Amino acid sequence: MKKSIFGFILAILLICPFMSQVLRAEARDTDSKVTDADKIFYYSFDNISGGLIADEWGSRNAVLSGGKISSGKFGSALEIEKNITGASVSNALVTEDAWTVSYWIYSKALSERSSVLMSSDGKYSFDAAISSSNLKTGVHVGTGSGDVLTFQYTLPAETWVHMTWTQDKTNGLSLYVNGTVVQTNAWTKTNAFPCPADLFGHLWRDVLTFQRCAMI
């Protein structure tokens, strides 16, 4: 079983789903709490060389594009300005049925769709705000206007927030905020939702800071 954890100013981590002790861990402690067999990718944003953001668990190095490295809640972070893709990874879509992703995120008030992570085909994304008419956190599961899953959480402005998404075919897709479960949506129990992790900050509508991103 695979899992994930992410962090924004941007930090991303992807790991296995049922690790409650990891969900609440600070980013610097995560690596010691995850077995090698469960690790998929991890970006601390502390290791940048030649325009590449090192995947510290594997070989999915990200290419720094429109984003810049700045200070985060813990160490370095990826800062992404409005309407710019901060970084990209080739072939990063993870299709396993069970995974976990978490990240720290910080932004000004949102007024329209703001995607934190997105698949390269634009079909799937983790959204801090779904649309101008729906500023709740959620995910896109297709390209149609109704292809969204809304979660009952609104990202506060100018506040560091730790978000974790867990997916498996027993429970569906769950959102945790600062270690507390917000909601679980059963739609993904019977429908595909591969973990979108190709584009960092694509369709972001303001300045985003993203930190400590990993997947298990």
Image (tube, helix red, strand yellow):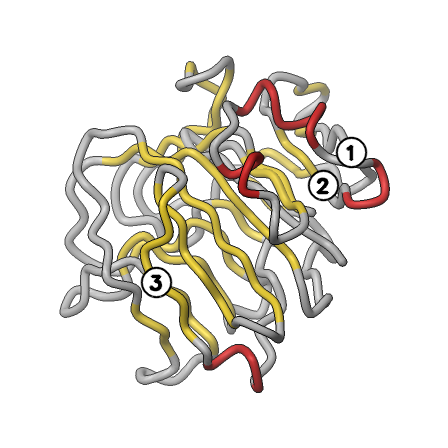
Location of mark 2 (residue): 41
Percent across and percent down for residue 207 are 29, 35
Location of mark 1 (residue): 57
- Going from the N terminus, do you reach mark 3 or mark 1 first? 1
Location of mark 3 (residue): 183
Q: Are marks 2 and 3 in contact (CB under 8 Å)?
A: no
Q: Give the crowd class for mark 2: few <14, some 14-19, many >=20 residues within 10 Å.
A: many
**Numbered badge on residue 162:** none
Q: Which picture quadrant has residue 38?
A: top right
Above-or-below relation of 161 to 149: above
Q: Mark 3: which amino acid?
A: Gln
- Going from the N terminus, do you reach mark 2 or mark 3 first? 2
**In the figure, is residue 113 to the left or right of 4?**
left
Regarding mark 3 in the picture, which secondary structure is present there?
A: strand
From mark 3 to mark 1, how far is it between C-alphas?
29 Å
Q: Give the crowd class for mark 1: few <14, some 14-19, many >=20 residues within 10 Å.
A: many
Q: Are marks 3 and 1 in contact (CB under 8 Å)?
A: no
Above-or-below relation of 204 to 69: below
